[in-house]
Amino acid sequence: MRDAFEYLRIDPHARVPIAVQLAEQITWLIASRRIGRNDRLPPIRGLAARLGVNLHTVAAAYRQLEGDGLVSTRQGRGTSVLGYDRSRRASHTPDVPTFIIGVLITGHSAYFDPFLEALKPSGEQDPILLVIGTTHDDPREVSDNLDRLVAKNVDGILVASLGRPEDPALSESLLEAFALPPIVYVDLPDAPGPKVLFDLETGASKAVSHILGHGHTRVGLITGPDGWPHAAPVYQGYLRAHEDRGLPASPDLVAALPDLTLEAGRAGAEALLNLSPPPSAIFAAGSELAFGAMHAIRGRGMRIPQDIALVGCEDPAEAHLVDPPLTTVRLPAAEMGRQAMSMLRTLIHGGTVRPSSVILPTRLIVRRSCGCLG
């Protein structure tokens, strides 16, 4: 494994003092977990020789790191890393704008494209640089990304991925929110601060009600796990559609999967189609779930919508390209991006966001997979 200190580079001609250059780089290595708790920093004399700088310069950098609560120096034992302390870092950071905004998303996908595009500044807005981190819905990666963004002194953060709210790693990050810059949460119903949400309950209700309107009485639901923050509003919308039409909603028609992947959608559809009797229609609460369900239905030699109707969610570009084109609940991701950035700018400039929670309406896009437009 490459020695973390080999990453260090010094520019003697830069306007930034060499000691500050060195301290900032080591801070980044600690925040990025390249240097871990209890690791030792190189001896001052040795690092000075390696970098070709005065040993007093390295000593000054180590003193800055110690003042920031990142390291501890003991006579005769050298300098040990204490770990990254976000609160200490925040208290020693100048309160000046960097024009950098951090964005945390689950991963790079077509779902986030319109959201990210809407974040770009236009007109008279402040110029900003977006720093995008992917978390894969892993709370530890969320926490690590937050540390890195604070280390870069970002002006604010948009968080569109948290993982499971009950995870201890995530709880620790949120408890340290006082040490974070302004944050706006995106598409996270359980988030603890200002947020922009989709009206998933109404969207699910519209989708299921539309299917029931075609005469179906057994409508399956493919959704995420119980801990998934969107599961509750989707399920409530599913129930509401049945209640509005005076029809019972059977619990055995709900397939809750561990994630929202193609494979999960396929497995969910297989489980529903194995029921006796199976549903005559399915609502999948995600585009990947819907496409996975489509594969499972076709794998059984069944036709959509003649043998089973299918409705998805999110409305990706592929929805109108598949055969048959997929009826979906469209989520206004671009509008979510605009609203979230507007809220974050208000917070960055010292304002108060009211209301603290914005809920965006969804829209049912009717195509052939539900049995319409045939």
Image (tube, grey):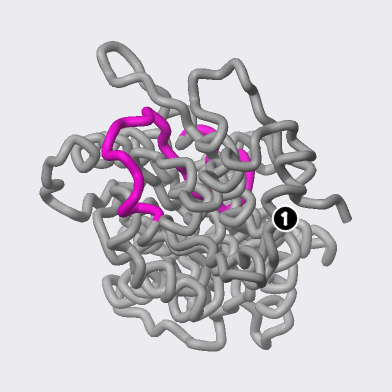
Q: Is residue 111 above or below residue 74?
A: above
Q: Is residue 278 above or below residue 25?
A: below
Q: Tell me the residue at 62%/75% (across/down).
A: 257
User: How far across and down, in percent of the image, does residue 169 sit?
Assistant: 51, 75
Q: Tell me the residue at 46%/65% (across/down).
A: 215
Q: Is residue 21 left or right of residue 215?
A: right
User: How far across and down, in percent of the image, does residue 121 sit?
Assistant: 37, 21
Amino acid type, label 1: Pro
Q: Tell me the residue at 65%/59% (across/down).
A: 33
Whether residue 141 is in magenta: the answer is no
User: How far across and down, in percent of the image, does residue 148 sit?
Assistant: 53, 50
Camera-side residue: 139 or 374? Answer: 139
User: How far across and down, in percent of the image, does residue 114 sit?
Assistant: 49, 33
- Residue 23 appearing in the image: yes
Q: What segment is highlighted magenta in the picture?
A: 89-114
Quadrant in which residue 194 is drawn: bottom left
Q: Tell me the residue at 37%/30% (across/down).
A: 98
Quadrant in which residue 178 is drawn: bottom left
- Residue 374 appearing in the image: no
